[in-house]
Amino acid sequence: MKELQAEVDAYIGQFKEGYFSPLAMLARLTEELGELAREVNHQFGEKPKKASEAEKAIEEELGDMLFVLICLANSLNIDLEDAHNMIMNKFNTRDKDRWTRIDQNGGK
């Protein structure tokens, strides 16, 4: 994750404008989430794509979201690896008994 954050920072660092404001990036992240939702709905939901709509992959939309999320984290000096580790610790402690585990023999 540190490499991804550094790569995005190097890319953004080439431009005078730098990172957008956190609020603008949140709006962009919301926009990208809408595009992802649209693609998921087209592929797995009841709303088929119009013939005039361009083909986009869920992978591309997730990539767009990841890029904007990294930009937001970088602009706020947040290490996403640290954030990930914090959340995984929460899941492995507070939420450790929240879900039904698959037993060791592969059954449920």
Image (cartoon, rainbow, N blue to C red):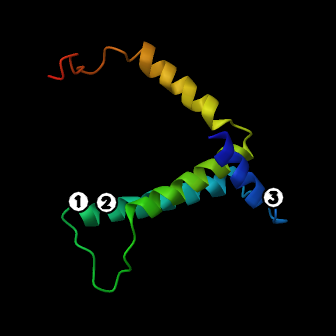
**Disc 1, disc 2: CB below 8 Å?**
yes
Amino acid type assigned to the residue bearing label 2 in the image: Val
Between 26 and 92, which is closer to the camera in this rendering? Answer: 92
Q: Secondary structure at mark 2?
A: helix
Give the residue type at disc 1: Phe
Residue 61 or residue 3, whichever sits in front: 3
Q: Is residue 52 above or below residue 42?
A: below
Residue 40: mark: 2
Tell me the quadrant of the picture where the N terminus can be found. top right
Q: Residues within 10 Å of mark 3 (few under 14, many from 20)?
A: few
In whole angstroms, how far apart are the C-alphas of marks 2 and 3? 33 Å
Left or right side of 12 for 30: left
Circle 1 residue: 44
Residue 30, x across and y down, in percent: 50, 56
Residue sitting at x 36%, y 15%: 96
Residue under label 3, please give it. 13
Secondary structure of residue under mark 3 = loop
Chain-order first, disc 2 or disc 3? 3
Image quadrant where residue 10 sits: bottom right
| Residue positioned most to the left | 107
Q: Which mark is residue 81?
A: none
The answer to whether residue 58 of the structure is visible from this angle is yes
Q: Residue at x 46, y 56 (%)?
A: 62
Q: Farthest right residue?
A: 16
| Label 3 or label 1, whichever comes before in sequence order | 3
> Which residue shows up at 30% across the image and 18% down it?
98
The total number of labels drawn is: 3
Between the residue at mark 1 and the residue at mark 2, the CA separation in whole angstroms equals: 6 Å
- Residue 31, how many percent across, how many down? 50, 61
Q: Compute the Cα span from label 3 to label 1.
A: 38 Å
- The amino acid sitting under disc 3 is Gly
